[in-house]
Image (cartoon, rainbow, N blue to C red):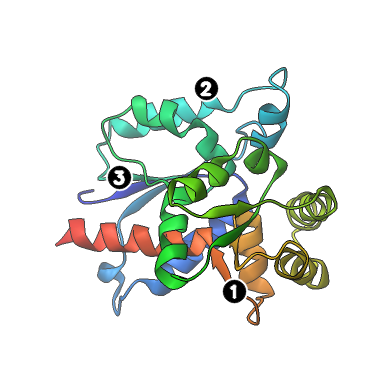
């Protein structure tokens, strides 16, 4: 196969399925041959990213992710995508293991925030405890000259319940809980816009969209950037 890219997914599997589904939906195709060429690595057994970030005595996801990158690099994809925000904790290590570019989802998301909401200054961040603790988005927001707004402990507890109990464990979206999290970030934390910094939150947005408040969906941004690169390299 020529002119393809590789998706390092499975973190979690339903969120990866949502990413691939949106990618296929947005591809301007009218025949089988007009869709994108890609390899999906659904590595579902990668150890939990948040568990390791919060406690380094837990199994590390890095060896599994490095193995995926190294194996796939031998096939020479045009680029990699990593549809898991928390896994970007390991981004520098993964990029150092290959000369093939890896799209940086948090960085691209913050660029999209600035493009869509040029007057926004206070940028709310939602995601797993791992993403909040390792400051993946906080650093990107600050580097863009904006002010990161972090969730309170209560909001973060609700977010983790939505991500792990509702979505990962039961493959359901508690719409009321999801919408309440976004409202609290706007109303109580005074964020101008809220980043959905976890692909499970992206899945929640796909199934039970919040359309009244300003949000930027990291997975949706990754879909758009993937599509741009893939169509460009196919020409």
Q: Residue at x 80, y 55 (%)?
A: 155
Residue 125 in the figure: left or right of residue 160:
left
Circle 3 crowding by C-alpha within 10 Å: few under 14, some 14–19, many from 20:
many
- Ranked by sequence position, the earlier of labels 3 and 1 is 3
Residue 167: tell me if it is visible.
yes
Name the residue nearer the viewer: 86 or 75: 86
- Ranked by sequence position, the earlier of labels 3 and 2 is 2
Name the residue nearer the viewer: 12 or 108: 108
Q: CA distance from mark 3 to mark 2?
A: 20 Å
Residue 6 in the figure: left or right of residue 20:
left
Asked which quadrant contains residue 6, the reply is top left
Residue 226 in the figure: left or right of residue 185:
left
Name the residue nearer the viewer: 108 or 77: 108
**x and y percentages locating residue 61 in the rendered image:** 58, 28
Residue 198: tell me if it is visible.
no
Circle 1 crowding by C-alpha within 10 Å: few under 14, some 14–19, many from 20:
some
Q: Secondary structure at mark 3?
A: loop
Q: Residue at x 73, y 24 (%)?
A: 55
Q: Residue at x 53, y 62 (%)?
A: 121
Name the residue nearer the viewer: 15 or 219: 219
Residue named by callout 2: 63
Residue named by callout 3: 79
Could you tell me which quadrant the C terminus lies in? Answer: bottom left
Q: Dots 1 and 2: beta carbons under 8 Å?
A: no
Q: Dots 3 and 2: beta carbons under 8 Å?
A: no
Q: Secondary structure at mark 2?
A: helix
Please give the label number shown on residue 214.
1
Circle 2 crowding by C-alpha within 10 Å: few under 14, some 14–19, many from 20:
few
- Ranked by sequence position, the earlier of labels 1 and 2 is 2
Residue 133's place in the image compared with 17, above or below, is: above
């Amino acid at each position: 196969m020529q002119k393809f890219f590789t998706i390092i997914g499975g973190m979690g599997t339903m969120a990866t399925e949502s990413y691939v589904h949106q990618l296929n939906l947005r591809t301007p195709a009218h025949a089988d041959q007009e869709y994108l060429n890609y390899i999906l690595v659904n590595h579902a057994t990668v150890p939990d990213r948040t568990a390791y970030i919060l406690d380094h005595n837990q199994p590390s996801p890095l060896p599994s992710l490095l193995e995926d990158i190294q194996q796939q690099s031998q096939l020479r994809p045009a680029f990699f995508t990593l549809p898991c925000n928390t896994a970007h904790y390991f981004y520098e290590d993964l990029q150092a293991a290959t000369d093939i570019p890896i799209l940086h989802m948090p960085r691209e998301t913050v660029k999209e925030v600035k493009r869509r909401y040029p007057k926004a200054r206070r940028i709310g961040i939602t995601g797993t405890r791992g993403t909040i603790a390792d400051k993946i988005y906080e650093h990107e927001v600050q580097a863009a000259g904006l002010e990161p707004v972090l969730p309170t402990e209560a909001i973060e507890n609700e977010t983790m319940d939505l991500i792990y109990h509702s979505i990962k464990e039961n493959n359901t979206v508690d719409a009321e809980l999801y919408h309440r999290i976004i409202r609290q970030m706007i109303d109580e934390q005074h964020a101008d816009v809220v980043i959905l910094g976890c692909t499970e939150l992206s899945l929640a947005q796909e199934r039970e969209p919040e359309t009244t408040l300003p949000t930027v969906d990291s997975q949706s941004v990754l879909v758009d950037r993937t599509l741009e690169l893939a169509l460009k390299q196919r020409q």
